[in-house]
Image (cartoon, rainbow, N blue to C red):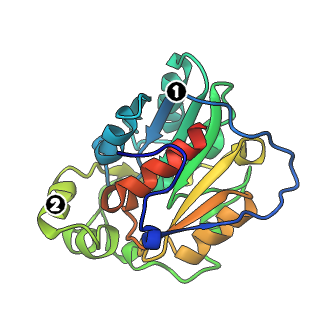
């Protein structure tokens, strides 16, 4: 059984790293019973299934948002509608691209803490593409193909660069349900930086081939996040669900 007060035993897969002091004063997270999750590109809301069951087993109320992957304002609006329904303090969790949504919509009054899982975490108004360009391009980028305005990962790139530590049979199922994203989604910019005022947590994937791990470390350090490093592909929420669930439980208080 999971223990809300500790990380899993044998945590060679995840090392808790102390966060640096931040310039913005933030209180400790309020105790939360709600968790709202958002998925990123090349996925749908079911990608959180392994983590959801673990959190529900600890008595938390969990909702996984179906990110429309159309435009950034529409993605933010979809998450905000779910946050509006929560009845109290809520841990807001995002993977990959959806870190943009956390950063923008995480100023919502119901949000008590933010959890970024190998996720984008730009500052307000920051050009994420320009930030990412300061680091070596991750291999998955070369595997994006377009059908008109709809983008997706090729099967080879999905299995090798997105879900590299997932058993192949399971990874192929995930590939089969990946949702296409609209090109317009990638043009969005945040106007808020919720991590400047909300307690923040970050899970770096050290074997990530979709977002450069050093970029993840930079963003985590900049936000002063409580940070763990997971020996994982981009999909730590599927390959290491216990570790990610414990980080969320830590954020829930």
Going by the image, does 209 lie left or right of 108?
Answer: left
Tell me the number on the disc at residue 140: none
Q: Residue at x 48, y 42 (%)?
A: 71
The 10 Å Cα crowd at callout 2, few under 14, some 14 to 19, many 20 or more, is: few
Q: Residue at x 50, y 43 (%)?
A: 4
The 10 Å Cα crowd at callout 1, few under 14, some 14 to 19, many 20 or more, is: many
First in residue order: circle 1 vs circle 2: 1
Q: Mark yes or no: residue 156 visible.
A: yes
Q: Is residue 80 above or below residue 138?
A: above
Q: Residue at x 67, y 60 (%)?
A: 127
Q: Position of residue 231 (x, y in %)?
A: 42, 73
Find numbered disc 2 in the image and state the secondary structure of the residue it sits on.
helix
Find numbered disc 1 in the image and state the secondary structure of the residue it sits on.
loop
> Label 2, on which residue?
170
Please tell me whether mark 1 or mark 2 is closer to you in this view. 1
Q: Position of residue 253 (x, y in %)?
A: 61, 38
Between 139 and 50, which is closer to the camera in this rendering? 50
Q: How many marks?
A: 2
> Label 1, on which residue?
33
The furthest residue to the left: 169
Q: Position of residue 48 (x, y in %)?
A: 34, 45
């Amino acid at each position: 059984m999971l223990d809300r007060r500790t990380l899993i035993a044998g945590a060679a897969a995840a090392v808790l790293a102390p966060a640096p002091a931040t310039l913005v004063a933030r209180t400790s997270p309020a105790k939360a019973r709600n968790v709202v999750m958002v998925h990123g590109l090349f996925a749908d809301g079911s990608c959180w299934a392994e983590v959801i069951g673990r959190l529900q087993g600890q008595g938390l109320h969990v909702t996984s948002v179906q990110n429309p992957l159309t435009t950034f304002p529409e993605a933010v609006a979809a998450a905000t509608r779910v946050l509006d329904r929560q009845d109290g303090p809520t841990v807001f969790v995002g993977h990959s691209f959806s870190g943009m949504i956390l950063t923008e919509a995480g100023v919502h009054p119901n949000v008590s803490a933010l959890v970024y899982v190998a996720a984008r975490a730009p500052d307000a108004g920051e050009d994420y593409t320009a930030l990412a360009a300061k680091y070596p391009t991750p291999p998955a980028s070369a595997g994006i193909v377009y059908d008109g305005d709809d983008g997706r990962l090729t099967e080879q790139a999905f299995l090798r660069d997105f879900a590299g530590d997932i058993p192949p049979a399971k990874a192929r199922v995930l590939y089969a349900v990946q949702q296409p994203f609209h090109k317009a989604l990638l043009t969005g910019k945040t106007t808020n930086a919720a991590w400047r005022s909300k307690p923040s947590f970050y899970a770096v994937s050290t074997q990530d081939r979709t977002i450069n791990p050093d970029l993840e470390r930079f963003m985590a350090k900049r936000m002063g996040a409580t940070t763990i490093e997971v020996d994982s592909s981009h999909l730590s929420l599927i390959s290491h669900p216990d570790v990610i669930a414990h980080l969320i439980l830590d954020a829930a208080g």
